Image (spheres, helix red, strand yellow):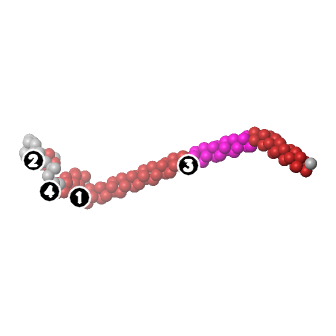
């Protein structure tokens, strides 16, 4: 009798565990899918935040690059103005820049000099400096 009672208890325990498993499994599946959905949502939110931060970084970099370009242009403008004033005006500055370019490129084999005939026989750069009537 002892063996029969024990067997019945084992069968009842197995049935109870099976019933709990059958009842609990659908509930666990719903819970697991809910948690997976929440995880996917949080991942999407985090990815969106990352994209926004990357876009903001690109915007900041572009703004700073633009500010640097403006500062560089202002500096170049000021340097050109000072140089032109020290040489006696824009025409003399352009003449100096032309001579400087000729000096810098004198040794390079890429430079070609082409002489063009003019009415006065002078380079075009000097044509405007000749007094009228001569």
Q: CA distance from mark 3 to mark 2?
A: 66 Å
Give the crowd class for mark 2: few <14, some 14-19, many >=20 residues within 10 Å: some
Q: CA distance from mark 2 to mark 4?
A: 24 Å
The residue under label 4 is: 107
In the rendering, at what x and y percent does residue 41 appear?
64, 43
Is-magenta flag for residue 15? Answer: no
Q: CA distance from mark 3 to mark 1?
A: 55 Å
Q: CA distance from mark 2 to mark 1?
A: 22 Å
Q: Quadrant of residue 99?
A: bottom left
The residue under label 3 is: 50
Q: Looking at the image, is mark 3 or mark 1 earlier in the sequence?
A: 3
In the rendering, at what x and y percent does residue 129 appear?
15, 49
Q: CA distance from mark 1 to mark 4?
A: 26 Å
> Mark 4, mark 3: which one is toward the viewer?
3
The residue under label 2 is: 122
The residue under label 1 is: 87
Q: Main secondary structure of the magenta part?
A: helix
């Amino acid at each position: 009798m002892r063996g029969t009672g024990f067997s019945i208890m084992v069968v009842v325990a197995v049935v109870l565990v099976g019933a709990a498993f059958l009842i609990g499994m659908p509930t666990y599946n719903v819970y697991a899918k809910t948690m997976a959905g929440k995880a996917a949502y949080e991942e999407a939110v985090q990815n969106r935040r990352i994209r926004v931060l990357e876009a903001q970084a690109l915007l900041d970099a572009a703004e700073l690059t633009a500010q640097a370009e403006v500062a560089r242009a202002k500096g170049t403008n000021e340097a050109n103005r000072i140089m032109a004033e020290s040489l006696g005006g824009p025409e003399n500055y352009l003449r100096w820049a032309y001579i400087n370019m000729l000096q810098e490129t004198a040794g390079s084999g890429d430079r070609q000099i082409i002489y063009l005939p003019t009415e006065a026989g002078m380079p075009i750069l000097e044509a405007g400096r000749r007094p009228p009537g001569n």
